[in-house]
Amino acid sequence: MRIAVFALLFLAALQAADPDRDFSGVWNLNPQRSSIRGLPFPADRTLRVEMSGDTVRCQGETNWTYNTAGQSSANTAAGTSFSSLLKWEGSSLLINTLASGSRRYTLMDRWTLSRDRNTFTIRRQYLAGGGESESTLVYEREGSGTNAAERPPAALIARREPPPAVIRRFVVPRGTKIPLATVHSLTSKQARTGDRVYLETTFPILAEGRVVIPPRSQVAATLTAATRAGRVKGRAEIYLRFDSLTLPNGVARDLRSRLSSAGDQAVEGSEGKIQGRANKAGDVKTVGGATAAGAGIGRLGGNTGAGAAAGAAAGLAGVLLRRGPEIILSKGSGVEMVLDRDLTFDAGELP
């Protein structure tokens, strides 16, 4: 315990004895030597710093109080709370500040003094929303020869809100397969060209480890063509075009994607065509069988020639009136689409 107390006293004495660690003074911002890089100039170009023991007091746009003994420092300004931790790194003072309120961001400052102790430099990193900006503020000690004529016009340094940080983007690449489920049933018997079809995602789609397209995102599609199964020959066909994707929070994207599977139905080509099954008995075989069966029944009537002809005609008519299998996608049927182009979302658009 005594060793720890002695160490703290030694560090405090070292700080007091080291002029490179004393930032006390009145400092004026030199915009020409500073590199703001998108961040606004401080509205108050004069910064007053007072250091006493483990306490650092700053007066500029707002009043700040820091503690250099490893304790967290709390400050409040404009409805935002700031929690700061300070650490010495040689003669440089590192200040890590977390801001919480209507906006959350982190500031990481490094304070250094020039050898003549007339230039005070703050190198700052601003982190928010997955992006970051860097800036350098150069202050000159008041009375050390700062040229007031070099200061920028007031319009340039007017108070402004900090600009948004660099926006992080997430990309779902082309070729990604997205499993869907139909919201309503769909059949080739009732489908009409131009009908709207609604589906929803059933599995989360990730990019860079983050869920970009969550389950139950809505997908809207259009039937560009619909054909019922034919009589004797001709399979049922449905052409489906995916139009848009809407996330649960309302963010939407237009789509260019194609159908890759539709339950147990056959999907052909890149045009989004679902094709129904052929008549299992075979069109020609069915016609022949029905005709022969009809002829046999006709013979039982007594008049062999006339009965056979009438029976064959009846059998053929039965086949011609009967259609092949229709396409049926019941509610909740699985459908899979493949993206033909990238989908890009900003971090702020994601749920």
Image (tube, rainbow, N blue to C red):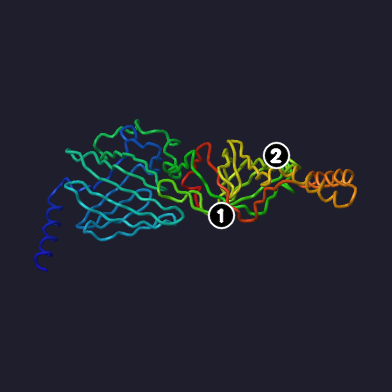
Check disc 1 and give the amino acid type: Arg
* Mark 1 vs 2: CB contact within 8 A: no
Check disc 2 and give the amino acid type: Ala
Residue drawn 29% across and 38% down? 138
| SS type, badge 1 | loop
User: Which of the 4 image quarters holds residue 287?
Assistant: top right
Mark drawn on residue 216: 1
| Few, some or many residues within 10 Å of mark 2 (<14, 14–19, 20+) | some
Closer-to-camera residue (187/265): 265
| SS type, badge 2 | strand
Q: Is residue 205 above or below residue 117?
A: below
Per the image, the residue denoted by label 2 is 225
Residue 18 lies left or right of residue 322; in this view the side is left
Closer-to-camera residue (6/223): 223
The location of residue 179, given as percent across then percent down, is 53, 49
The location of residue 342, given as percent across then percent down, is 50, 38
